[in-house]
Amino acid sequence: LFVAEGEKVIRRAITAGYPVRSLLLTRDMLDGPASLADLAGSCDGPAYVVAPELAERLTGYHVHRGALASMQRRPLPSVAEVVDGARRIVVLEDVVDHTNVGAIFRCVAALGFDAVVLAPRCADPLYRRSVRVSMGAVFAVPYARMGDWREGLGELRSAGFRLLALTPAPDAVPIGEVPADAGGRLALLLGSEGDGLSARWRGQADMGVRIPMSRGVDSLNVGSAVAIACYLLAAAPT
């Protein structure tokens, strides 16, 4: 199971084919001008309508969007299935903050990348906060989780992807200057919030790329970095 929060996110999950198990709605969302009565009526499972104060007591936090859905997960596809036909993908190694994972999915969706591949220890894209921060983009972007961290990049290289490691290293190529022969199938590798990419993954990459910075700043939040990198690579030749 996973929890979707807010009307837009719930509707996007339903549109993407995730079955609703049950709904929890606050009375004001059912009776107010933005009525969710149609959601309640279309849900195969029960819809519980409660006062906002009771919703907060039940969940442990302020349900300011007034709607929660308990939803069934779907089986994850394999990495091979997800990257089949993809031209540009993002690959996450040990990104463990759910907010960052949600932000990355939103950037991937907005900037035209095709899929996300997760290392085994990455945070769950369907965790409630990830889903909320992504505004439902986790339902629109295909993703898969590697079974083998050590050799997982080899599968992507065998599929024809050129591996670009995003790093603050001064000898890395400025990402806006990625040469034309780095076009085709591109996989942008992003590392953990603290240490960045592991030495193993940096060593397996075809090229290190960096976002030029000034005033002594050496790195950005991974969500901000992926937005910049995806925007620039989206314009790279294919």
Image (cartoon, rainbow, N blue to C red):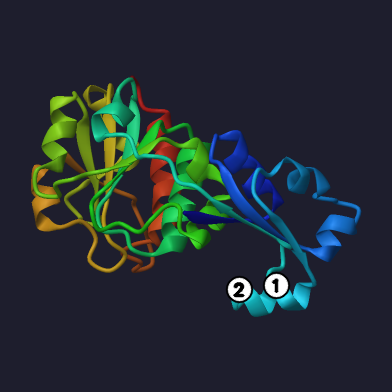
**Do the residues bearing badges 1 and 2 touch, measured as CB atoms within 8 Å?**
yes
Q: Nearer the viewer, residue 27 or 141?
A: 27
- Quadrant housing residue 6: bottom right
Is 59 located above or below residue 199 in the figure? below
Question: x and y percent of residue 171 in the render?
Answer: 16, 50
Horizontal side of 74 relative to 146 (left or right) equals right
Disc number for residue 59: 2
| Label 2 neighbour load within 10 Å: few <14, some 14-19, many 20+ | few
Residue drawn at (40%, 31%) of the image: 114
Is 187 located above or below residue 129 in the figure? above
| Label 1 neighbour load within 10 Å: few <14, some 14-19, many 20+ | many
**Three-letter amino acid code at disc 1?**
Ala
Residue drawn at (41%, 37%) of the image: 232
Horizontal side of 174 relative to 114 (left or right) equals left
Q: Secondary structure at mark 2?
A: helix
Q: Secondary structure at mark 1?
A: helix
Residue drawn at (45%, 38%) of the image: 231
Is 215 located above or below residue 40 in the figure? below
Disc number for residue 55: 1
Q: Is any atom of residue 206 visible in this view? A: no
Q: CA distance from mark 1 to mark 2?
A: 6 Å
Question: x and y percent of residue 60 in the render?
Answer: 60, 78
